[in-house]
Image: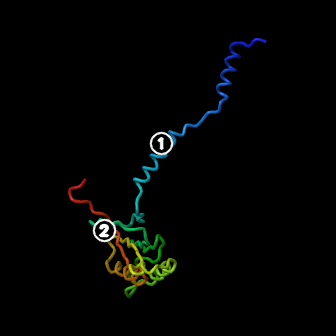
Amino acid sequence: MKMSRRAKRMQRNHKRNKQGSTLNLTALMDIFTILVFFLMVNQSDVNVQNSDDISLPVSVSENQPNEQLTIMVSHSDILVQGRVVVATAQAKLETGEQLPLLKKELEYLASRFPLTPEQQQAGRPITIIGDKGIPYALLKKVMNTSAKSGFNNISLAVEKKQPAGGA
């Protein structure tokens, strides 16, 4: 039996389309390469937990803080690593130079990670993020409590001041 032209054409097309399609990875690799470079350029070395109710003081300091334990002192609460430890109003009423609830939390965190002798010389690092409206007396209590709990290497977080005349 003789095949019609249409049947021959369909047979040809079926043979040609029978070969599986292949995936061209070149475009996909280009996209991933651009994505990796974008993430590397825009990555931040330090994550500072910031809250909308805290406005940091301005400084010309060039040093960037390292990743370490953070204490946030806002108008409402004192937080250690994002966990509320004591209310700021209660901390202001505390007599003495230390805050017992904060000291208890810091001593617990210090006991979880023992230091090597070299690290003990420098002290445990800690960053205090305090609103610029917080009274210095309260900030002093927080720093004193930190020092007595073994966190001697204290850094205060500030917002970097732009140089004069800069855009």
Tell me the mark number nearer the camera, choosing from 1 and 2: 1
- Residue kind at label 1, given as amino acid type: Asp
Residue bearing the label numbered 1: 30
Which residue is the extreme one toward the left? Answer: 165
Q: Residue at x 37, y 79 (%)?
A: 143
Which residue is the extreme one toward the bottom? Answer: 96
Residue 158 to residue 18: above or below: below
Q: Residues within 10 Å of mark 1 (few under 14, many from 20)?
A: few
Residue bearing the label numbered 2: 57
Q: Quadrant of residue 75?
A: bottom left
The CA span between labels 1 and 2 is 43 Å
Image quadrant in which the N terminus is located: top right
Residue 145 place in picture, x, y as percent: 40, 82
Horizontal relation, residue 63 to residue 12: left or right:
left
Which residue is the extreme one toward the front? Answer: 118
Residue 144 place in picture, x, y as percent: 37, 82
- Residue kind at label 2, given as amino acid type: Pro
Front in this rendered view, residue 114 or 144: 114
The answer to whether residue 3 shows anywhere in this view is yes
Q: Residues within 10 Å of mark 2 (few under 14, many from 20)?
A: some
Front in this rendered view, residue 85 or 26: 26
Q: Quadrant of residue 99?
A: bottom left
The answer to whether residue 75 shows anywhere in this view is no
Q: Residue at x 52, y 41 (%)?
A: 28
Horizontal relation, residue 93 to residue 9: left or right:
left
Residue 34 to residue 144: above or below: above
Residue 160 place in picture, x, y as percent: 30, 63
Q: Residue at x 37, y 77 (%)?
A: 153
Q: Secondary structure at mark 1?
A: helix
